[in-house]
Image: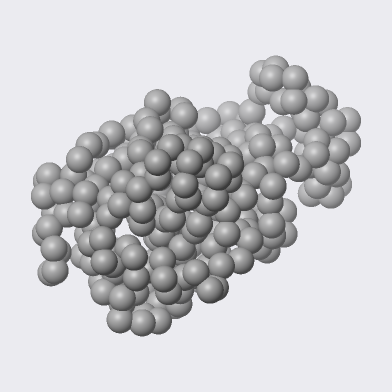
Amino acid sequence: MEKIKHISAEFKDWILNTLKSGASPEAIAAAMIKKGFDETFAYQTLLRIVGNQSVKTAERSQAPFVYEVPEIGQKGNIIATSDRDIKVLSRVDHPFILHLDNLLSYEECDELINLSKDRLQPSEIIDSETGEKKAASGRTSKGMYFTLGENWLVTAIEKRIAELTNYPVENGEGLQVLNYKIGEEYKPHFDYFPSTRVNPEQGGQRIGTLLIYLNDVPAGGETVFPKAGVTIVPKKGTAVYFHYGNSKNQVDRMSLHTSIPVAQGEKWVATKWIRQAKIY
């Protein structure tokens, strides 16, 4: 069988993010060879990327992302749900980002933290090679997941998110709560899956993320979109929604984002990932 001697732009992004998560170039090259890449090509590609040199990618992966305004972006500056009005503080179209106010009340934020504290475990990422969850040096927080409809508060929040985004509750993964202490961070990454790890029978690709801030952070902990030059400062009860999937099954590489280290205090956030279709 002929060995692979080209990479897609998406695969190049995966290599960059895997390097940033702490994996060694040797381990990545070995994974590429296992996937069928030519050994010399794999090591040369890694050397060029590590050396910050240009790497040519396959033309078939170069189609520009086609931006489509999601339904949440067509609702104006005050979005009414059945139990509260959510205000749009700012908007960016490329990539699509909405900064939202009044998503959760202070009481809801506090209760979500209290329900999570005793269930925190070291945060994990999805391994792009195996598709399994694993610990990663680039993500130093602790976290936990609620199941859909696990309690009255989670049920209320899920209903509100569904009304806000116009995606059914069943399209969302279980609500995740994360806690970052001083110095903890999440290095630059994408939320969508590598194309080889998209399972149509489990909701398909991730297309949007809602990140909810559960406390005020005295210093640090901002969410940064480095390719877009956008920074969101954590504020209790606010949220940021970013959309990175479209009807053409493309994903937006402009959605690269990071959580910078907490400098003072701690940071609590809740995350809801939305899929193309129902997961359950």
For the point 24% across and 47% down, the residue is 100
Image location (x, y in percent) of residue 212 = 35, 54
Q: Quadrant of the C terminus?
A: bottom left
Is residue 255 visible to the viewer in this orientation of the structure? no
Image location (x, y in percent) of residue 227 = 46, 28
Count the labels in the image: 0
Image location (x, y in percent) of residue 266 = 48, 50
Left or right of 267 in this view: 8: right
For the point 69% across and 60% down, the residue is 134
For the point 31% across and 40% down, the residue is 97
Is residue 78 visible to the viewer in this orientation of the structure? yes
Q: Which of 177 and 29 is in front in this view?
A: 177
* Image quadrant where residue 90 sits: top left
Left or right of 183 in this view: 74: left
Image location (x, y in percent) of residue 117 = 50, 69
For the point 85% across and 38% down, the residue is 26
